[in-house]
Amino acid sequence: FKHCYSTAAKSVASIRINNEDYGTDDYTNVTPKILSYLNRNLHLQKGHPLSLVRQRIVNYFYSSFTHGGNPSFSVYDNLKPIVSTKQNFDDLLIPEDHVSRAKSDCYYVNKSLLLRAHMTAHQSELLRAGLDNFLMIGDVYRRDEIDSTHFPVFHQVDAVRSQRKEQLFENHQGLEIFEKHFLDQSQSFKNSINDPTKQSCHTLEATKLMENQLKNHLLGLVKVLFGDNIKHRWVDAYFPFTHPSWEMEIFYEDKWMEVLGCGIVRNEILMNAGPNNSIAYAFGLGLERLVMALYKIPDIRLMWSTDSGFLTQFENKDINADITYKPVSSYPQCVNDLSFWLPNELTIDTFMSNDFYDLVRDVGGDIIEQVKLKDKFVHPKTKKQSLCYSIVYRHLERTLTQAEVNQIHKEIEKAAVQSFGVVIR
Ligand code: FA5
Ligand code: MG
């Protein structure tokens, strides 16, 4: 973090990211640790498991959908991760007061810019550029819990496929995408999502046909990756930018795991961005979830490993090769508890766990395997409130000594005292 001083005595803090300066304000919560992930581009790193699966997904869409021998999807895998709140939220009809905008859930550069929280942030700009079939692939950033399947940076593959009447009803000429009363009064028509089966502007035929294509295309993809025997199910979902919406779950290691969200794009988005005679589906899938299931990689942190024991298991392999990850070896965990009294102005309910998780990771780095809230306590007499967190330490590539862990644990305590004004118990 750098402070610049303008000629007036007022100080203007700014932050430098990829050779550009950004003004900071009370929204700024990106950390140096998070910014260090910005240029890793694991999804483009040759021989990286995320890159292998990215290529297989792209190949599936290239080869399944062609137009006059050319792929009809275009691929964007190098879009800049700093986006505006308009791109990430407003353009996608996400309400002003929606929880997903909270400072506690996103990494903000400042009040109007953030590290994208999903690849859907680029949907409207690409529609506006006149595209109708496209994939958007890249790194996304979220403040989240810490465990084996959550990391604050992960990768998504997002897509839009839109069709005009002639394409959608190729074999059923005479059917319409839009309801007659919508076409009659398209300026004043208020699109509603009260009917769970469709948007009020769309015909049921168009919606059902799109739903069918969407589900078949995604099931086809999952079968290409995991084989025909993969068990899947569709779950009704809600996204502000699609209606109806679904999530797909696959059965993996005795559990249902959500791998993607999808739905029929809200017509307001298409109208705002340009094409007003089409219907579109969209989806967003989590690349790590698929990669971990496919190669049996047990911990999401391994994706960021630069250890040759990890990387060589995937390098120089055919992208369709059957690979099962073999643990390099498993080093022991070290668990230390951290309890503290909250300052008077904070309560158990207002203390931001995500702020604490970021601090732990900033100080501890990637040896932090998990942070769990272990205990909440209110002193019966003084009413002072306290929290206890268990911090699980494990290095992926060597054994940590207790002394080494204690040292880092002390530093986390010190940082917590400084940042939150807590008192260590
Ligand atoms: C979204 O991000 C929507 N933008 C997806 C979408 C796009 C819906 C277009 C409709 C139309 P969600 O937050 O559920 O949705 O994330 C999508 C997928 O990303 C999840 O299914 C999961 O596979 C993956 N994912 C979400 N959070 C994490 C995380 N913390 N770590 C790893 N993968 C995650
Ligand atoms: Mg979800």
Image (cartoon, grey):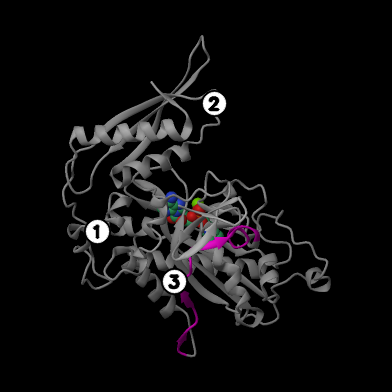
Q: Report the residue at 51% width, 27% height from top.
A: 348
Q: Name the residue that disc number 3 marks.
A: 78
Mark-to-mark CA distance, 3 and 1: 22 Å
Q: Can residue 247 be seen at all in this image of the molecule? A: no
Identify the element where label 2 is drawn: loop
Per the rendering, the mark at residue 347 is 2
**Mark 2 nearby-residue class (10 Å; few <14, some 14–19, many ≥20):** some
N-terminal-most mark, 2 or 1: 1
Horizontal and vertical percent position of residue 107: 50, 51
Q: Give how far across and how far down residue 54 sits, in percent.
A: 37, 68
The part of the chain drawn in magenta is 69-90
Disc 1 residue lies near ligand 1 with CB under 8 A? no
Could you tell me residue 202's position as x and y percent? 70, 67
In the displayed structure, 82 sits above or below 168; it is above
> What's the amino acid at mark 1?
Thr
Image position of 163 (left or right of 140)? right
Counting from the top left corner in percent of width and height, residue 379 is at: 48, 14
Quick check: marks 3 and 2 in contact, CB under 8 Å? no
Q: Which residue is mark 1?
A: 306
Q: Is residue 76 magenta?
A: yes
Dot 3: few (<14), some (14–19), or many (≥20) neighbours within 10 Å?
Answer: few
Query: Is residue 220 shown above or below 89?
Result: below
- Specify the quadrant of the image occupied by residue 367: top left
Tag 1, which secondary structure?
loop
